[in-house]
Image (cartoon, coloured by chain):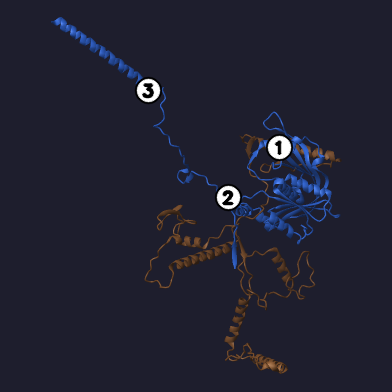
Chain colours: A blue, B brown
């Protein structure tokens, strides 16, 4: 026997529909958590990442001892949390003797693990240690620039994956319209060697230059750290194909008042509002009006002279009468 | 400077310089950061050049440009929504060529002579509004036509719900269940019955199946080296769930049905020997023992026994009369 369970309120229904798979997806949310043992560095890194991604990140504070992302049984908890919070990116921090200051950056597809990159954090400098003009602080939610330097990002497999993951993690929403006044910050990643990446976060200062394009100036602001690649897991081929599928045709946006004809080609319809030709007040200097006036004057004068003549004739005739008799 | 071509992905505001390599790793940290920032500035300037060259519209906050689609392919977070399979009515309508009719918001109610809404409170053709139902020749004398109408409506609603459930099950089978609907099982399936709950093989199921397959070796999978994370077989040996022997509150009817079915089969096969001799003998012996016991008790308490009424045993015998 089956029962149909539907949400009782419209609000719940909207929330469920928001989390459903869609053609154009929501911005990815990040889940930040840590394992049984963490160090000060790991805590600071997790906190800074959370502050940078405040609007679309969830930070858990409890220790999770049964989460081991690289072991086959240790991902169930992660997948459960991802399902409950609707997060498809996660950052898992831990610290052990073998892997000090460890961060596992991972992505999910359909709330199952898609791929993982494990990095170690070296030479971490937090935001507080940088001295800069407070007016330059990047605002939360502004779209960042990315600069990837080094051929390693193209040739080394792990660095390629790390580049993708960092892009996914920090890019925020995919927007169509960008306000050029809101350009704030940039993430600079340099592949120093095939296994280490120097990662830093800078604020942007736009300076006046002669041309329309302002001159960019980088001021180091945010956390800077060395990421040492440890382990990684690439996605399965089948899952990868499923996840990178795109619809070839863009979703049918209805274009109104345009139709296509085989003979005539593209036809458009224009609707003109009602022109109330009868009720428009006439202006005073129209050529025709002038002529009318002129003729009216003429006819008036002609009338007057006609009357005068008639009067004259009358008087004349009267005179004639007098004379005649 | 201009000769260096960076890969610029404008949709992501990203620039990548594949041609740069550090000839010698800078000795100190400051030098490294300085070099990186310099290079970073170059890249950002390159992006800005392209960005500010785009046509922009003036807004009160600043110039707004239209970004193109990002060129780096990043994986989706969820699968594509699957198309819903057509419902039973949709299939029927397609074969018959029935197009959906447009209904107005209000309809004229003949009973009350007013324009009413189609569904909900104060609706058209409501059963409440009918004061008189004229009797027809085909009507039976004892029937209440009003309750008959109610019962018919209830049947129609139940049929519709059943059809709706069927459509949703089909959709769930195709993986296209609407996101706000869940199908939940209200009872466990009994042994031998098909399960209607649409299931995708989950991770735990696959792990269990792996465990089951491992027992196919000669030693039952006991000495196989297991992979890390592989779970042992859950129900070692047992693969079926039976109904409990002790009758619970809701289970008795199902158990009765099950046993009655089996009994019927047996009865139809061997209708000659109905009597179970062994059972009859044991019952007879038990009865004899009880009688002896009661007589012994009566001898002990002899005074009141003669006035006591004889106790009739309420047990039915297995012998059929």
- Asked if the residue under mark 1 is in contact with the one under mark 2, i.e. CB atoms within 8 Å, the reply is no
| Residue A324, label in figure | none
Q: Can you tell which quarter of the image residue A274 is in?
A: top left
- Which chain does tag 3 point to? A
In terms of secondary structure, where does tag 2 sit? Answer: loop
**Residue visible at 30% across and 15% down?**
A301
Which residue is labeled 2 in the image? A249
Quick check: do tags 2 and 3 share a chain?
yes
Give percent across and percent down for residue A50. 75, 47
Which residue is labeled 3 in the image? A289
Give percent across and percent down for residue A308. 26, 12
Give percent across and percent down for residue B318. 62, 89
Give percent across and percent down for residue A144. 71, 41
**Residue visible at 48% across and 62% down?**
B92
In terms of secondary structure, where does tag 3 sit? Answer: helix
**Residue visible at 45% across and 53% down?**
B106
Q: Is residue B137 above or below residue A238?
A: below
Which residue is labeled 1 in the image? B46
| Dot placed on the residue nearer the N-terminal end, 2 or 3 | 2
Res A227 seen here: no
Q: State the CA–CA distance, disc 2 to disc 3.
A: 61 Å
């Amino acid at each position: 026997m089956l029962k149909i369970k539907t949400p009782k309120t419209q609000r719940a229904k909207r929330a469920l529909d928001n989390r459903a798979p869609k053609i154009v997806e929501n911005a990815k949310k990040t889940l930040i958590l840590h394992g049984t043992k963490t160090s000060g560095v790991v805590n600071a890194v997790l906190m800074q990442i959370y502050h940078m991604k405040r609007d679309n990140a969830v930070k858990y504070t409890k220790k999770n001892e049964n989460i081991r992302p690289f072991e086959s049984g240790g991902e169930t908890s992660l997948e459960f949390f991802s399902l409950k919070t609707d997060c498809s990116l996660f950052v898992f921090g831990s610290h052990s003797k073998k892997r000090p200051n460890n961060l596992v950056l991972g992505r999910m597809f359909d709330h199952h693990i898609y791929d993982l990159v494990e990095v170690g954090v070296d030479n971490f400098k937090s935001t507080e240690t940088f001295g800069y003009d407070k007016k330059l602080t990047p605002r939360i939610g502004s779209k960042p620039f990315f600069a990837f330097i080094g051929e390693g990002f193209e040739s080394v497999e792990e660095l390629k994956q790390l580049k993708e993951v960092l892009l996914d993690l920090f890019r925020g929403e995919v927007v169509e319209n960008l306000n050029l006044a809101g350009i704030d910050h940039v993430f600079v990643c340099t592949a120093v060697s095939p296994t280490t990446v120097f990662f830093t976060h800078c604020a942007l200062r736009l300076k006046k230059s002669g041309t329309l394009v302002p001159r960019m100036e980088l001021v180091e602001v945010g956390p800077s750290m060395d990421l040492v690649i440890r382990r990684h897991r690439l996605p399965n081929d089948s899952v990868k194909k499923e996840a990178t599928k795109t619809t070839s045709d863009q979703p049918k946006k209805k274009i109104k008042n345009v139709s296509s004809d085989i003979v005539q080609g593209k036809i458009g319809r224009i609707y003109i509002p009602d022109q109330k030709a009868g009720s428009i007040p006439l202006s005073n200097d129209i050529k025709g009006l002038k002529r009318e006036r002129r003729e009216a004057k003429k006819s008036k004068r002609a009338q007057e002279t006609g009357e005068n003549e008639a009067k004259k004739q009358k008087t004349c005739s009267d005179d004639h009468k007098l004379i005649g008799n | 400077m201009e000769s260096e071509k960076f890969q610029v992905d404008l949709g992501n505001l990203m620039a990548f310089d594949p041609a740069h390599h550090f000839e010698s790793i800078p000795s100190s940290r400051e030098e490294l950061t300085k070099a990186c920032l310099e290079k970073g500035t170059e890249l950002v300037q390159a992006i800005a050049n392209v960005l500010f060259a785009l046509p922009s519209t003036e807004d009160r906050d600043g110039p707004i440009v239209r970004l193109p689609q990002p060129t780096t392919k990043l994986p989706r977070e969820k699968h594509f929504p699957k198309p819903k399979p057509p419902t039973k009515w949709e299939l029927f309508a397609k074969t018959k060529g029935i197009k959906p009719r447009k209904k107005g918001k209000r309809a004229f109610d003949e009973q009350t002579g007013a324009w009413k809404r189609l569904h909900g409170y104060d609706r058209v053709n409501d059963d409440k509004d009918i004061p008189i139902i004229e009797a027809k020749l085909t009507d039976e004398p004892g029937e209440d036509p009003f309750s008959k109408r109610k019962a018919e409506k209830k049947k129609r609603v139940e049929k519709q719900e059943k059809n709706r459930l069927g459509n949703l099950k089909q959709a769930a089978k195709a993986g296209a269940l609407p996101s706000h609907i869940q199908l939940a099982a209200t009872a466990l399936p009994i042994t031998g019955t098909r399960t209607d709950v649409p299931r995708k093989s989950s991770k735990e199921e696959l792990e269990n199946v792996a465990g089951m397959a491992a027992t196919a070796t000669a030693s039952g999978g006991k000495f196989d080296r297991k992979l890390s994370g592989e779970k042992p077989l859950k129900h070692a040996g047992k693969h079926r769930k039976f109904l409990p022997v002790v009758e619970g509150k809701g289970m008795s009817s199902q158990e009765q049905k099950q046993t009655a079915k089996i009994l019927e089969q047996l009865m139809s096969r061997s209708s000659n020997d109905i009597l179970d001799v062994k059972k009859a003998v044991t019952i007879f012996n038990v009865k004899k023992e009880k009688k002896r016991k009661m007589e012994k008790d009566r001898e002990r308490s002899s005074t009141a026994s003669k006035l006591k009424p004889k106790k009739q045993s309420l047990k039915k015998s297995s012998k059929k009369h």
